[in-house]
Image (cartoon, rainbow, N blue to C red):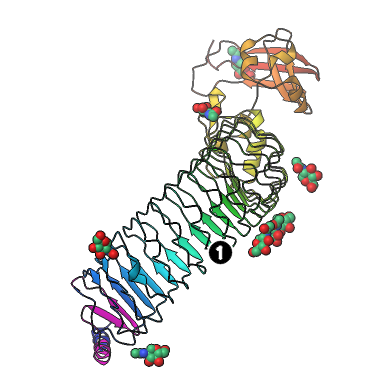
Amino acid sequence: MLPGAWLRWACLLLLARLARPCPVGCDCFAQTVFCTDEALATIPLDIPPYTTDMVFIETSFTTVGTRAFSGNPNLTKVIFLNTQVCCFEPDAFGGLPSLQDLEITGCAFSNLSTEIFSNLATLGKLTLNFNMLKALPEDLFHHMDALESLQLQDNQLQTLPRRLFQSLKHLKTLNLAHNLLAQLPEELFDPLGSLQILRLSSNKLSSLPHHTFAKLGSLQELFLDRNSISELPPEVFSQLFRLKKLWLQRNDIRHLPPSIFSSLGNLTFLNLQENALQMLPADLFAHTPRLVGLSLSHNQLETVSEGAFAKLCNLSSLSLSHNAITRLPAGVFRGLENLTKLYLGSNNLTALHVDLFHNLSKLEVLSLSRNLLTTLPEGIFGTNYYLFNLALHGNPWQCDCHLAYLFTWLHEYSDRLFNIQTYCAGPAYLKGQAVPALKKEQLVCPVIRGHLGLEDRELRGSWDLSAKEWAARNQCAYSNPEGTVVLACDKARCRWLNIHLSPRQGSGSLGMMYNATQEWELKSSCGVVRLTLSIEAQAGEP
Ligand SMILES: *[C@@H]1O[C@H](CO)[C@@H](O)[C@H](O)[C@H]1NC(C)=O
Ligand SMILES: *[C@@H]1O[C@H](CO)[C@@H](O)[C@H](O)[C@H]1NC(C)=O
Ligand SMILES: *[C@@H]1O[C@H](CO)[C@@H](O)[C@H](O)[C@H]1NC(C)=O
Ligand SMILES: *[C@@H]1O[C@H](CO)[C@@H](O)[C@H](O)[C@H]1NC(C)=O
Ligand SMILES: *[C@@H]1O[C@H](CO)[C@@H](O)[C@H](O)[C@H]1NC(C)=O
Ligand SMILES: *[C@@H]1O[C@H](CO)[C@@H](O)[C@H](O)[C@H]1NC(C)=O
Ligand SMILES: *[C@@H]1O[C@H](CO)[C@@H](O)[C@H](O)[C@H]1NC(C)=O
Ligand SMILES: *[C@@H]1O[C@H](CO)[C@@H](O)[C@H](O)[C@H]1NC(C)=O
C-alpha cells in the first residue's frame, strides 16, 4: 500500500474511534469489542452500550463482579480466552437477557459455585474448556433450560454429581473429553433426551454402568475412545437406535458380547482400533447393515470367521491391519460389494485363497504389506477392476514362476504398486532385487526331481511345486536317465533346444582348449526332446 493510502486508512480508523468511543486497551469493530491488553486490570466501565459480542484475550484482571455487564443488556456473547480470571462473584452474568454464548477457556480456576450462573435462562452455549475444574456442584446448570451445547473438555473432573444435568432437556452436545473421570453415576445422562453428541474420550473409565446410555434415544455420535474400558455391558448400547458413529478405539476391550451392536441399525462408523480383541463373535455385525467404515486394526485377532461381514453391503473401508491374522477363510469378504479400501497389512498371513477378493469389484486400495506372503495365487485380482493402489512391501516374496501372475498384473498396470520397495526374499540369486524391476524370464522354477522319479533331497526340500501343479501349468520336465541334465519348458513349444556357448571377447577367463559338442535325448511324460550343447574354444588357443 502507498504511504498516502495508508495515511488515509489510519485517518478513517481514527475517525471511527472518535465517532464511536472504545475502552482503553480494547478494539471495537461494529458491535464487537476485543480487549487484548495484558495490562487491563479490570473490566472496562465504558463498553459501548450497543455491544453484542465481548471478547477478552490474555487480560490480567482476576475477578468478574456481580452483574459485571449489566450496562450492556444487548450482549449475546461473552468470551474469556487465556485470561487470569479465576473468581466470579454471585450472578456474575446476571442482567443479560439475550446472552446466548458464554465461554471461559484456558483460565486457571478449579471450582465454580452455583450462584455464579443463577440467571442464565437464555444461554444456548456454555464453554468451560481447558480450565482446571476438579468438581462441579450438583445444581450448577439447574437454571439453564435453553442450553444446547455444554463444553467441559480438558479439565480435571474426577466424578460428576448424579443430578448435574437434571434440567438440560434441550442439550444436543456434551463434551466431557480429556478429564479424569473414572466412573459415571448410573442415571447421570438420563435427562438428556435430546442429546446428539456425547464426548467422553480420554478419561479414565474402566467400565460403564449397564444402563448409562439407556435414555439417549436421540444420540448420533458417542465417543468412548482413549479410556481403559475392558468390558462392555451387553445392553449398554441397546437403546441407541439413532446412533451413527461409535468410537471405541484405544481401550482395553478383550471380548465383545455377541449382541452388543444389535440395536445399532443406523450405525455408519465404528472404530474398535487398538483394543485387545482376540476373536469376533460370529454375528457381531449382523444387524448393522449401514456400516460404511469399520476399523479393527491393532488388536490381537488371529482370524475372522467366514460370515463375519456378510451383511455389510455398504461397507466402504475395512481395516484389519496390525493383528495376528495367520489365515482368512476364502469367503470372509463375500458380500462387501461396496468395499473400496481393505487394509490387511502387518499380520502373519502366509497364503491367500484365490477367491479371497473375488467380487470386490469396487476395491481401489488394498494393503498386504508386512505379512509372510511368498506368492499370490493366479487370478486373485481377476475381478478387482478398479484396484489401483496395492501395497506389497515387507513380505518374503519368492521370485520364481509362481510369482508370474502378480508380476504380469503389476506390469500391465505399472503405476499401481503403492511402494516399489518390494523385494524378493528368494531364490538366493534374486534376493534383495526389487520385484517390479525384474524381467519375466527371471521368474523360473527348477524341476522337481521327485516327479521324475529321481532322488535329490536338497532340491525337493526347497521347491514346493507338486507334480500335478507342474502339469497344470502346461509345462514338461525332461531328463536324461541319469538325472544329471534336466530341462523344464512349455509343453506347446518345447521340442528341441540348442545351446551354444562362445567365449566373451577379451575376457580370456573361461579358456577352453577344444570345441566340444554333446547331445542328450531327454524324456518326460510329454515326450522326448533333443538337447545339443556346443562349447566353442577361444580363438588362437591351441
Ligand atoms: C438493543 O437492541 C434493541 C433491539 O435489537 C434495540 O432496540 C436497542 O436500541 C439496543 N440497545 C442499545 C443500547 O443499542
Ligand atoms: C473457589 O473456591 C475458593 C475458596 O475455596 C474461593 O475463594 C474462590 O472464589 C472459588 N472460585 C470460584 C471461581 O468460585
Ligand atoms: C434409524 O433412525 C431413524 C430416525 O433417524 C429411525 O426412525 C429408525 O427406526 C432407525 N433405524 C433403526 C434400524 O433403528
Ligand atoms: C446403503 O447406502 C445407500 C446409499 O447411501 C442407501 O440408500 C441404502 O439404504 C444403504 N443400505 C443399507 C442396507 O443400509
Ligand atoms: C507373527 O510373526 C512374527 C514373525 O514371524 C512372530 O514374531 C510373531 O510371534 C507372530 N505372531 C503371531 C501372533 O503368530
Ligand atoms: C452398495 O451396493 C449396492 C449394490 O451394488 C447399491 O445398490 C448401493 O447403493 C451401494 N451403496 C453405496 C453406499 O454405494
Ligand atoms: C461372485 O458373484 C457371482 C455373481 O453374483 C457369483 O455367482 C459368485 O459365486 C460370486 N463369487 C464368490 C466367490 O462369491
Ligand atoms: C572352434 O570353432 C570355431 C568356429 O566355429 C573355429 O573358428 C575355431 O577355430 C575352432 N577352434 C578349434 C580349437 O578347433
Q: Is residue 200 left or right of residue 246?
A: left
What element does badge 1 sit on? Answer: loop
Please tell me whether residue 68 is drawn above or below residue 212 in the rendered image: below
Looking at the rendering, which quadrant does residue 20 occupy?
Answer: bottom left
Residue located beneath label 1 in the image: 193
Q: Does the Cβ of the disc 1 residue fall within 8 Å of ligand 3? A: no
Q: Does residue 189 show up magenta in the picture?
A: no
Q: Position of residue 46 (x, y in %)?
A: 24, 85
Work out whether residue 455 or residue 383 is closer to the camera in this orientation and state it.
383
Q: Is residue 86 above or below residue 419?
A: below
Q: Position of residue 151 (x, y in %)?
A: 42, 63
Residue in the picture at 74% in, 13% down: 452
Q: Residue at x 74, y 15 (%)?
A: 451
Q: Quadrant of ligand 3?
A: bottom right
Q: Quadrant of the N terminus?
A: bottom left
Q: Which residues are magenta?
A: 11-40
Of residue 185 and residue 395, the one placed in the foreground of this image is 185
Task: Give the amino acid type for the residue marked by disc 1 in the picture.
Answer: Gly
Q: At which x and y percent is residue 305?
A: 67, 37
Q: Quadrant of the C terminus?
A: top right
Query: Residue 175's x, y, as percent?
Result: 44, 60
Q: Is residue 474 visible?
A: no
Residue at 32% across, 84% down = 72
Classify residue 105 as left or right of residue 259: left
Judge from the rendering whether residue 328 lies leftward or rightward of residue 165; answer left or right: right
Q: Is residue 26 magenta?
A: yes
Note whether 164 is above or below 183 in the view shown.
Answer: below
